[in-house]
Image: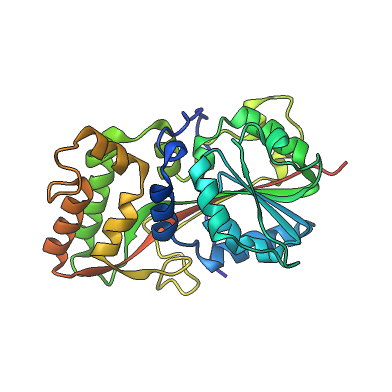
Amino acid sequence: MATAKTIPTTSATAPQKDPTFRVYTSSQAATYAQNRGAYPKELYDFILRRHAETGGQFNQLLDVGCGPGNAIRDLAPHFDAATGCDPGHEMIATAAQLGGSTRSGGAITWRVSSAEELRQASGLPDASVDLLSAATAAHWFDMGPFWREAAALVKPGGSVALFAKTRMYSHPENPAREAVQQILDDYEKNVIGPHMMPGNWVLRRFFADLELPWQTDAAQTAFAEAKFERYKWNDYSLDGPDGKDFFGGSEVVPLERLYDLLSTAAPATRWREAHPEDAETERDCVRALTTRLKEVSGKDQLRLTQGLALLFFKKAER
């Protein structure tokens, strides 16, 4: 089992809502689903194991900010029923088209709903959710209302798992590894950095300053601070079980595929909106990145991974 590393909590900030994903077209949502891919099996196993070890049951899963459903399709086979919610109409339409099923053989239920209106829109009764998950989405939530909705919907003894892919990291086996990492870091800080919103930076900091229940409301007692668990993996370190690879592994990624992946990021979309004359040309922000990576490494593909963050909460027993 990979070693999880804890990180300190800094001052909380309330991220703005993302203006990009909510208004995706059907073709953009389909491209997002295709290029974003899955999360590592090791991360899912870790979450499900902690859920079970802390008394969680496996009846109802609720995935919030589900997008086209990539994460919930991987988690749903462990639960009798599963519901995915997202505020983007085309994201939900794409998720429904792609489908997915639970361990009981039933179909995943899809609902258009923001994280702040789950009780009304999800169709789920109070105290019915065993595991509430959010995959690379919580940095766009208005956390106060979200925690109130979660407190109502999650069963006593149930769990909340907020997890995310964060930054891109180069494996030590890559040629010119340090130069490759410097290019990746420069792209994030100086190229798309001006097009980052506060939520993007919350994500890049591994959720270190995401608002927690007791920070949004001093009277919030549904989720006990004493049972809160915070983890991060792969932040410039090989956190795999043998110390030779990242937690969840790494992948040899063709630079053309990296171009497709990074093109789905909202800051890249906003960069292109600000530079329409350069978008998807050789001067495009993502194309310039992949060109620099090839020049420095001499390769058409690189071994890469992404950092991973997990915040794990337990609903207080009655």
Given residues 272 and 43, the one toward you in this image is 272
Quarter of the rendering occupied by the N terminus: bottom right
Indicate left or right for 170 with 92 as reference: left
Given residues 113 and 299, the one toward you in this image is 113
Residue 209 position in % (x across, y down): 50, 35
The coloring applied to the image is rainbow
Q: Is residue 100 visible?
A: yes
Residue 171, image quadrant? bottom left
At x 69%, y 24%, the residue is 218
Q: Is residue 54 above or below residue 283?
A: below
Q: Is residue 62 above or below residue 35?
A: above
Q: Is residue 68 visible?
A: no
Quarter of the rendering occupied by the C terminus: top right
Residue 127, image quadrant? top right
Indicate left or right for 215 with 7 as reference: right
> Can you name the residue that lies furthest to the top here?
218
At x 78%, y 58%, the residue is 59
Indicate left or right for 122 with 273 as reference: right
Residue 139 position in % (x across, y down): 50, 38
Given residues 249 and 101, the one toward you in this image is 101
Residue 87 position in % (x across, y down): 55, 38
Residue 235, image quadrant? bottom left
At x 74%, y 36%, the residue is 151
At x 39%, y 69%, the residue is 250
Residue 64 position in % (x across, y down): 60, 44
> Can you name the residue that lies furthest to the right here?
318
Number of on-image labels = 0
